[in-house]
Image: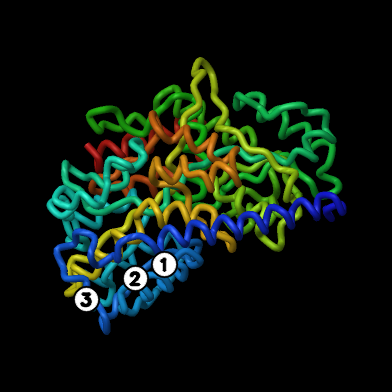
């Protein structure tokens, strides 16, 4: 869809305002204390040192932003290694366990920190975190801080990207199909998706893009969104798996039900394909990370600037309270065998600070970073430019659904994802049978 002149003008105004906001945020960062002087226990003289940082592809923009500014502040050099999102944990583990030891800091998926800790690949940072008030840990969003950092009572990192999914919708597509407001339940969502697909699929427009690629961060996210909506959980308060509960079965069935009317083909729809369909104006709905709203306005390929809306995830059955789903989320950790621990601490303190997070979430070009702190979530710049994103992100403040993070959690996530892929392909039996198999496997490896 080509923007009308009025919409195009509005888009230019938004982009200019975002750029202005980013400049203001960078000024705050520039006025902040130098990273090396911020309570790391080091004298802050890192000139001439080199830090090797490992990040995922969708964080490359943020990585370059951090590199440029940290180098300017400290005189250190930051070398970046960028890998696909589903390879970062194994890349870090192999580097440390093989003895190569080329990585100093990394930002892996939070679900992997238990396995990385058990494998001796990352440092226990509990003492440093507790003895460094300048980290301001009480400012981290409460429902994010513990899941992203804590394993068996010890902390192994600090939150970087506060990734949660929300429901985006294309206002123009909904209006064309007589849908006056976004759905509040998964049942309403399915009806709306079916309506749009029936009316417009002949023209290449579908009700929704469903992340169905066989990856815990993709297909696992689509399931987790529905699990949150139906009021379920992965494990109970004692850590015992509850993945075959009635709520979980309802969540899996809801995913099955929408599969046949979604943007083709869900099994091949990953982050890039789904986002591409959204930016092209080819889907009415997409469950996505909140920074998609930033990209919808600033991405040069976006055709949906000014025509999108966002709401919290729908609910299902007897559940009436929408919950945030911590589907992704990334944590800064320090490699176990680095010889540059003090430099790594300085970098992490800088990268996770309120000033930096506040700048990254409104930056243009888009950095892919979502709020991890209460102060950045409530920052004036974020509220001014993206008030709707700020509103839905407040759902992360309490009650969010988190994945297990202890030892074998990565394996558990993959088992679930593999079984869900079979279910959607018609090879796994019923939703109940599928999740009964997952429950049995999870009880073996999670206890």
The answer to whether mark 1 and mark 2 are in CB contact below 8 A is: yes
Tag 1 residue: 66
The answer to whether mark 3 and mark 2 are in CB contact below 8 A is: no
Q: Let me know if residue 297 appears in the view.
A: yes
Tag 2 residue: 53
Q: Position of residue 323 (x, y in %)?
A: 47, 29
Q: Quick one: label 3 or label 2, which is nearer the N terminus?
A: 3
Which residue shows up at 23% across the image and 75% down it? 101
Which residue shows up at 54% across the image and 34% down it? 391
Q: Let me know if residue 289 appears in the view.
A: no
Q: Is 46 or 226 nearer to us in this picture?
A: 46
Which of label 3 and label 1 is nearer to you? 3
Q: Quick one: label 1 or label 2, which is nearer the N terminus?
A: 2
On the picture, is 356 further left or further right than 76?
right
Q: Position of residue 419 (x, y in %)?
A: 45, 43
Q: In the displayed image of the protein, which residue is found farthest to the bottom?
A: 48
Q: Position of residue 260 (x, y in %)?
A: 68, 40
The answer to whether mark 3 and mark 1 are in CB contact below 8 A is: no
Which residue shows up at 19% across the image and 59% down it? 39
Task: Classify mark 3: helix, strand or loop.
Answer: loop
In the picture shown, does residue 219 fall above or below 68?
above
Which residue shows up at 43% across the image and 58% down it? 28
On the picture, is 193 further left or further right than 129?
right
Q: Position of residue 303 (x, y in %)?
A: 76, 54
Which numbered dot is residue 45?
3
């Amino acid at each position: 869809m080509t923007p009308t002149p009025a919409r195009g003008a509005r888009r230019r105004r938004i982009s200019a305002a975002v750029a202005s906001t980013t400049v203001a945020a960078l000024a705050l960062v520039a006025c902040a204390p130098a990273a090396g002087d911020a309570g790391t226990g080091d004298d802050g003289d890192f000139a001439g040192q080199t830090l090797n940082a490992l990040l995922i592809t969708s964080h490359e923009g943020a990585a370059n932003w951090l590199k440029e500014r940290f180098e300017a502040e400290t005189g250190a050099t930051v070398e970046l290694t960028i890998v696909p999102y589903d390879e970062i944990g194994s890349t870090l583990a192999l580097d440390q366990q093989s003895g190569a030891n080329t990585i100093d800091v990394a930002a892996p998926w939070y679900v992997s920190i238990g396995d990385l800790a058990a494998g001796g690949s990352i440092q226990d940072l509990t003492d440093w975190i507790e003895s460094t008030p300048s980290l301001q840990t009480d400012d981290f969003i409460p429902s994010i801080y513990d899941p992203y950092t804590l394993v068996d009572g010890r902390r192994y990192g600090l939150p970087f990207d506060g990734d949660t999914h929300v429901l985006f919708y294309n206002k123009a597509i909904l209006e064309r199909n007589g849908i006056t407001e976004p759905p509040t339940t998964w049942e309403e969502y399915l009806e709306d998706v079916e309506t749009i697909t029936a009316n417009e699929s002949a023209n290449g427009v579908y009700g929704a893009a469903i992340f169905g690629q066989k990856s815990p961060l993709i297909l696992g996210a689509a399931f987790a969104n529905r699990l949150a909506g139906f009021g379920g959980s992965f494990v109970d308060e004692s850590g015992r798996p509850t993945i075959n509960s009635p709520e979980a079965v309802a969540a899996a069935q809801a995913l099955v039900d929408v599969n046949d009317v979604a943007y083709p083909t869900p099994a091949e729809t990953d982050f890039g394909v789904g986002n591409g369909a959204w930016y092209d104006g080819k889907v009415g709905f997409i469950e996505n990370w909140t920074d998609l709203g930033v990209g919808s306005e600033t991405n040069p390929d976006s055709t949906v600037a000014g025509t999108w809306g966002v709401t919290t995830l729908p609910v299902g059955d007897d559940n009436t309270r929408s919950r945030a789903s911590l589907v992704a989320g990334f944590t800064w950790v320090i490699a176990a065998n680095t010889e540059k621990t003090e430099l790594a601490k300085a970098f992490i303190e800088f990268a996770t600070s309120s000033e930096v997070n506040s700048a990254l979430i409104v930056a243009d070009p888009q950095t892919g970073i979502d709020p991890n702190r209460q102060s950045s979530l409530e920052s004036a710049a974020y509220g001014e430019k993206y008030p709707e994103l700020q509103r839905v992100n407040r759902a992360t403040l309490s009650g969010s659904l988190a994945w297990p993070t202890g030892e074998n959690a990565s394996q558990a996530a993959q088992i679930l994802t593999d079984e869900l892929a079979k279910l959607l392909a018609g090879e796994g039996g019923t939703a109940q049978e599928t999740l009964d198999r997952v429950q049995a496997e999870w009880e073996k490896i999670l206890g």
